[in-house]
Structures are given as C-alpha cells and as structure tokens.
Amino acid sequence: PDLLYRNYKYQTSISLGLVEHFGRYADAVLAAVKPAAGSLIMDVGSNDGSLLKFFKARGHAVLGVDPATAVARKASDEGIETLPTYFTAQRSRELRAARRPAAVVTPNNVFANIDNLADFAAGVREMLGPDGVFVFETSYLLDVLQKTLIETFFHEHLSYFSVKPLRAYFLRHGMELFDVHRVPTKGGSIRGFVQIAGGTRPVKPSVAQQIALEEKAGLGRIETYRACHDRVKAIRLELLRQMQQWKKQGKVIAGYGASVGVTTLLFEFELGDLIEFLVDDNPVRHGLYSPGHHIPVLPSDAL
C-alpha cells in the first residue's frame, strides 16, 4: 500500500466532470440520510477533499482520511482536515474516542482498492453512530461485463462488486444494505446505502430487484465471463488490424489519457509498438513514461 498510495499522483479535481458529480452526490446523500446540522461526515480515500468541500459548504463537520501524504496535506491546507493515514478498525476506535461517531461514512471509487475487507467493515461499523449510514460508490461488475469495461481491471483494484455478495458481506459484519442505485460514474457504478443491522431504515425493493437482475444476467455463471473474454479478443483483433493499416499508410497514432486503465488497454490490446506518444491533462504526468512500454506522456496540446 505504501508503494501504491503514499506518493499518489491522481487528484480528483483533475478528472473532467467528477467534481460536478460529487456536488450532486453530496446533495443526494444528504437528502437520503438527513443528518442533523453539524453532523460529522467522513470520507475514506478523500484525496484532495473535493467531495467533503460540498458537505462542509452545507454546514457539516468533515474529516478526510487518505494515505497520500502530499495530497492530504494540500487538502488540509485548503480547509478540509485530512489525516494522512489508512482507514482501519483500530484507527476508527481511536477517532471515535477522540472525536465523535460519524453520521455518514463514504468511500468513493476506493472500496475496490481495499485488501482487508473484514477489517474495513469493522472500521466502518465502529465509526458509525447508531443511526449513521455508510454510503459507497464503486464500479459495478454487471456494467463491466455488459459494456466490456476492461480498463477497470488494473493493479489497484482487488475486488469487483455486485449486489448479491455485497449484501452477504455486510450482514456478516453486522450491517445491512438497505438501498442501491445504478449510476453512470466510471462507465457504470453502484451507489449503496448501509446501516447497522436492525437500524430504523427499511430495506428498499431496489436491493432485491438488483439481485434479480444480476441473476438473470448470469453473474453467477462462468459462461458469462467466458463470453466477455471472447468479446475482448474480437475487439483486440479488429483494433490491431485497423491500427496496423494506419501505420502502413504512414500515420502517427497517439493515445489520449495516461491513466492506470490505459496501461491495461496497452497490454491487453498489444498496442505498445503502435502508439508513439500519450497525452494527459494532468501536468504531474508530463515527462513520465507508460509502465513497461516506455511510451512518453506529453501535454494534451501536443496533439
């Protein structure tokens, strides 16, 4: 984890449209949970504090937790207190004792990166107040398979989530998934709402409806995954045919974006020898090179 996250380059504010999404997201969470004014809201993997800024502007106390040292310091300097550490059950016990329980705990596009999911669940349960709600947003396996979103498979992602196993996961750890929505973020995600088991909020029909949809789509059958593999293979063959044709015509081929997902695409589609350079909007990536292929990363105006 230290190798991956202590010197993390990514910043939420760089991602086109994501800050605006977080503004809408904050309003949706507050409308659903209705925490009392001034309640504590914690974001796990809070990055530069883009989400917490919206909760703070709406009158709530906020706290970020993120192991990326420089990014956490920058967020704190900009008024969003951010602890440069990992979120664990032990850390939650310390924070709850030193401060107070949280009305809302959120991890957004972070849940899939966590190795010890049992400890994470214990930490969430420890941090939540009696009527608190854990709200997560994460890439949705059903969208990954249906849309062939293979760029979501990369070294940081350790889990790929669907609703049926999530419901069982939370129950094992004394919590209850009571509502779920599909959202368009990252090509297709789910937003789940979780309370301590036996909480006051009724389980909404959306949970059972989504599980039924997953079962109908065959998420529990190996054939579904083999079919996705075959689609990826067909895409690779067609893409290589087209790009090799362009190369023979003397065309220059560049790639837009130097994200972790792009690295997956370069290797899976065997594009390393066909792309001459990558461009990216994030200036911290300029002058660097793609892992393995050593393709240079340039500013976007290089196009």
Image (spheres, grey):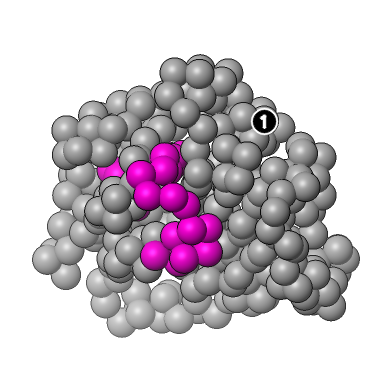
Residue bearing mark 1: 122
Closest to the observer, 291 or 281: 281
Is residue 288 toward the left or the right of residue 236 in the image? Answer: left
Q: Answer above or below: position of 237 versus 167.
A: below
Residue placed at 54% from the left, 49% from the top?
154
Residue placed at 44% from the left, 60% from the top?
30
Residue 118, can we see it? yes
Asked if residue 88 is among those painted magenta in the image, a careful observer would answer: no
Is residue 282 toward the left or the right of residue 228 in the image? Answer: left
- At label 1, which amino acid type do we have? Ala
Q: Position of residue 294 (x, y in %)?
A: 33, 45
Q: Which residues are magenta?
A: 27-52
Q: Answer above or below: position of 232 versus 33.
A: below
Residue found farthest to the front: 36
Describe the element under mark 1 as helix, strand or loop: helix
Q: Answer above or below: position of 2 versus 258.
A: above
